Image: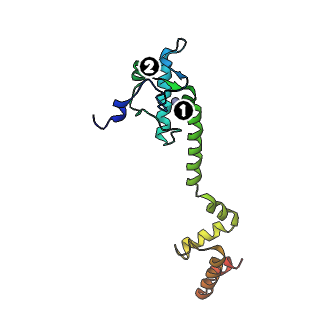
């Protein structure tokens, strides 16, 4: 258990989140109205969500291996402000941003929309496939046009020439 230093050194008399014993510490286990174990469970679930997307709002003093029951047994305490940093609503915002970022990347970014706006996109890709497979994918459209015209002229390809001189 030598590697579990955090677990052994855990000081339950200070804020489990920031490790500071100053200020007003709240202890859900002492709460009369609410079920302390539920509060700890919600907090730990939220914490794991932050941890999963590597977006912990602040470094914490516990390992994340503890169960809500363990928190309950030790009467884990925290500052209200520290606890609020792990609010499920904040996790939702982070997850939402992450999802937007991922879906944005998978759509191919601005390059795709630029090609779409060229109007020639369909014709070009058709020509790539049938006439000059795979050679011009990375070409800029201006030079691509010239190259194609040159090639069509050299090949005396009337069909292709008709398309590129449009
Ligand atoms: Zn704190």
Residue 135, given in percent of the width and then of the height, sits at 53, 75
Q: Quadrant of the N terminus?
A: top left
- The secondary element bearing badge 1 is classed as loop
- Image point (61%, 83%), residue name: 152
Q: For the point 45% across and 23% down, which residue is it? A: 76
Disc 2 crowd, CA 10 A, few/some/many (<14, 14-19, 20+): some
Residue that badge 2 annotates: 75
Picture quarter containing residue 165?
bottom right
Query: From the viewer's perspective, is residue 145 above or below residue 154?
Result: above
The numbered mark at residue 86 is 1
Which is more toward the observer, 62 or 50?
62
In the picture as drawn, the residue positioned furthest to the right comes out as: 166
Is residue 108 depicted above or below 45 in this figure? below
Image coordinates for residue 37, horizontal then vertical, percent = 46, 19
Percent position of residue 138, x then y: 56, 72
Disc 1 to disc 2, how far (Cα)?
18 Å
Q: Residues within 10 Å of mark 1 (few under 14, many from 20)?
A: many
């Amino acid at each position: 258990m030598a590697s579990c230093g955090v677990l052994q050194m855990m000081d339950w008399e200070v804020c489990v989140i920031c490790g500071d014993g100053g200020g007003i510490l709240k202890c859900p286990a002492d709460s009369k109205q609410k079920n302390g174990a539920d509060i700890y469970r919600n907090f730990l679930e939220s914490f794991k969500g932050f941890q999963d997307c590597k977006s912990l709002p602040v470094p914490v003093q516990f390992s994340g291996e503890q169960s809500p029951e363990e928190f309950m047994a030790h009467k884990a305490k925290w500052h209200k402000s520290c606890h609020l940093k792990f609010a499920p609503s904040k996790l939702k915002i982070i997850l939402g941003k992450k999802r937007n970022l991922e879906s944005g990347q998978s759509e191919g970014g601005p390059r795709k929309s630029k090609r779409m706006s060229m109007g020639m996109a369909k014709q070009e890709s058709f020509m790539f496939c049938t006439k000059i497979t795979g050679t011009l994918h990375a070409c800029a459209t201006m030079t691509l046009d010239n190259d194609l015209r040159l090639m069509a002229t050299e090949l005396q390809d009337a069909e292709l020439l008709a398309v590129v001189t449009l």
